[in-house]
Amino acid sequence: MAQEEGSSSVTSPPLQFLPWMPLSPGMGSPYPWLRELKSEDRGLCLIHLLLACANHVAAGSIESANIGLEQISHLASPDGDTMQRIAAYFTAGLADRILKGWPGLHRALNPKQASLISEEILVQRLFFELFPFLKLSYVITNQAIIEAMEGERMVHIIDLNSSEPAQWINLLQTLSARPEGPPHLRITGIHEQKEVLEQMALRLTEEAEKLDISFQFNPIVSKLENLDLESLRVKTGEALAISSVLQLHTLLAMDDEMHRRNSPSGSKNPNSNHFQRVQINQNRRTLGDWLERDVVNAYSSSPDSALSPLSLAASPKMGSFLNALRGLSPKLMVITEQESNHNGFTLMERVTEALNFYAALFDCLESTVSRVSLERHKVEKMLFGEEIKNIIACEGTDRKERHEKLEKWILRLELAGFGIIPLSYHGRLQANRFLQSYGYDGYKIKEENGCLVICWQDRPLFSVSAWKFRRYD
Amino acid sequence: MPVDLDNSSTASGEASVSSSGNQPPPPPQQPPSKSAATAKKKRNLPGMPDPEAEVIALSPKTLLATNRFVCEICNKGFQRDQNLQLHRRGHNLPWKLRQRSSKDVKKRVYVCPEPTCVHHDPSRALGDLTGIKKHFCRKHGEKKWKCDKCSKKYAVQSDWKAHSKICGTREYKCDCGTLFSRRDSFITHRAFCDALAEESARAQPHTPNPNPKPIKESDPKVQVESSPPPAPLPPPVAPDFGSDQGQAPPGLAQSTGMISSPVLAIQSPELPDNPPQFIEEAPAQLQLQLRLQPLLFASSTASGNLQAPQSPAFTDLIHAMAHPDRPTDLTPSSIEPISLCLSTNQGSSIFGTAGQERRQYAPPPQPAMSATALLQKAAQMGAAATNASLLRGLGIVSSSSSSAQPDNMQWGQRQMEPENSSATAGLGLGLPCDGGSGLKELMMGTPSVFGPKHATLDFLGLGMAAGGSPSGGLSALITSIGGGLDVAAAAAASFGGGEFSGKDMRRS
């Protein structure tokens, strides 16, 4: 039914006089004027629609969500501009979440298949190459390692997610130029896939050969949560360094599983569970809470903020893992993580945080890679798209992408007995120099409490922090 | 890389102990090996050349030249000084010209002409002419000598000879299965070898061995990989990413792939036999590949040459990615700097080039608004008109609309400011820490439908509207966005709190 215009002072020319058609589902694609939308307006539209739809999904109103998704589909596209692409992947995540309410449907559309390892390797490689983040993280990590291992003759490095040989090739090269000569180096790489580790082994030993460094690579094929620390075989007398690049957050998934098991509303069916749980939480959220959360950051009682000591202590898996690491007495531990809170309790929180975070990442791509590039498409779809889907649609142990902000990591690590090592000025200099040689504007490095945060246009994206085992004092 | 301070006269000469005939005129820093009568020359500490020494920088051509000694009369070249002297006698020179001008031989040190090399710096110069020649060949030269038993290649003939003597003679074997020909490397390995540290067998012995010889001999694939023109087989998946990654448009990649496949075909059969020939044959193609850098999806005809590919795309990827590896050792001076020391500091050198090829890509001509800016703007526009009905419509549970009002007023005033994203970032979605409040503002901010008459109308006409006949919510939104800041703020809160809370409860 047609809608009156009202007495608004709308000034947008082409739209105001078209008769409004009811947007009942079942109409074809009746919105020719959609195409005339400027990209900016379309983007804004998409944002509003996305948030509205996410709200519906969070509240469990599937009908409304369905309509919302349909509306967005007219505007979003994985080949369009940044906002269109983001919307496409977010709606895919939301749709996946809804579909999980019908497990049969979901399984039928997502059959279990061993994804090609080659594809995964490729996508990780593309992420490494299209962005400077990993390279910067490696530069900073290696610089911290070099500084910590000054004078050490035997160095053992444990890599919690060993997939990119470049990191250690760089270290090998820098070590070989050390004035006192390179140390005996041993690297233990942990990864779920044997093939990746074999690759690493090959490349690293080849490089060590060339540089004439005494080197040994120990592969460990294991999931991080099942890691048996005995298998690391840390020896006395060697200096230990641990490197974790975008990996530590996956352990938080285990904690959530324990929470859910203990939660009173836990039912057997995990898929309907999260709808109920989310609604319960939404009710507890008042506007006052929303306003207060920014002010009273550390000690809010809301379960989501997870900054309260209570909730930090209630991460047994992470806590025990960190304690175990600390038990190895590492001289240095460098952690690189995404700087965003995607571990919020409620869907809406995660959606808004993820929107901001991935918007920045997609912007990076938009500014640096052509739109028709297949590599860019792959990274967007298979890396970011999957992360977004994981953040939005999965719960419990399935949701691995539990990114948290630096401040939370600092608290966690300090609780586990680690002390922060401020990253040196020299390390920061190296990183900045690298950025300059990299050639793209827009990336910045900021320093925050002794840690380095890599930003795109002032939006922090990744944080790198260095820790040491702190004795009881 | 140890400096070779032995007595061999030239790098390409025979690796034999030089006889005492080499003495006059004494080359600089002749180690006092044989005749105890000669005064021992002072030797500097390794790595620290004599500060008084004269630094000589020879050109690569000179260093590689095999016939250094040239007769000034007929320009015939000789590898050895003695041979030149013998030859000169045949010219029947008058006495005066016969003598060599024996000026005071000044101490000389040599620098490597390769600018990226550590020894280019005079403070790290090498003291021996032979040493610098060998160094240059080893590090920056092409490896023309290949061991016939294994696949190791050498640039210096003496190295090659020395290796051939011990290749195949193994005396030490570790429990983990690695073989060594040298005692010291064997002992070092044992110190680290985990096979000794435990008695239970691991599922697989350590894949990498410090001494790769046995692997090379047993597995032809790996063997090929280790030698400089590796066939594009699976092992080197990850190339020297520091070098050669660029974005060739797909069409170009295709053509390069086509070029590369015949190169591959040439390579594989020839590889074990004639490395020098191969080098001569395909420099043009390799140069071409080096410049064009196909990153992905080279021609699928190349895949036929690959063994054990996982999938065609992956195969092509490996194939394409393997290309940068090959030239690395073949065209020495041009490639190595790229992979080794692109930026000035060593730390980040290996990651160096990635951006530089990519600089050629220009962002799309029309500067579309970035997504982050859009999000910020959306949050700002939220300040333009606030409406309790929107809260309801979007399902945000809010304690009361009254608490929303003061904020609305605030934002209503704020909207008067020009779009100043940094100033309003505090409220907008631009500030990442503000997740929750950003959400709230964004939710509350979406402008309402104009002049709606029935009370149940909410934002997109979804959910609340009975029977789900949405009344142009989408269109209204677009209109209102287009209208932007002109939307009357008076359109606030016309629906009252009662209905609002009713909906609230219904939602929960």
Image: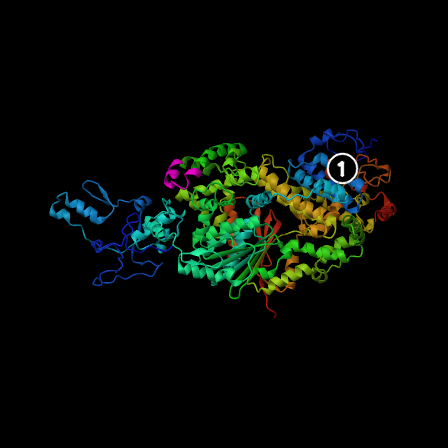
Q: Main secondary structure of the magenta part?
A: helix
Above or below, B29 against A470 in this view is: above
Residue at point 67%, 45% (across, down): A388
The residue singled out by tag 1 in the image is B477
Q: In the rendered view, does B78 fall on the left or right side of A338?
A: left
- Height in image: A182 above or below B479? below
Where on the picture, by quarter, is residue B451? Answer: top right
What stretch of residues is rendered in magenta? B267-281
Query: Considering only vertical position in the picture, is A220 above or below B339?
Result: below
Task: Determine if the magenta segment contains residue B274.
Answer: yes
On the image, which quarter does residue B492 sit in? top right
The local secondary structure at tag 1 comes to helix
Q: Which residue is drawn at 28% across and 62% down?
A: B42
Residue A50 percent coordinates (x, y): 73, 41
| Chain name for mark 1 | B
Amino acid on which disc 1 is placed: Leu
Q: How crowded is mark 1: few (under 14 residues within 10 Å), some or many (20 or more)?
A: many
Looking at the image, can residue B310 be seen?
A: yes
Percent of width and height locating residue A221 = 59, 53
Measuring from the top left, give residue B170's x and y in whole percent.
Answer: 40, 55
**Left or right position of B431 against B289:** right
Front one among A168 and B357: A168
Q: Is residue A16 left or right of residue B286?
A: right
Pick the front one: A240 or B42? A240
Magenta-colored stretch includes residue A377: no
In which quadrant is the N terminus of chain B drawn?
A: bottom left
Relative depth, front residue between B321 and B222 = B222
Q: Which of B493 and A120 is in front in this view?
A: A120
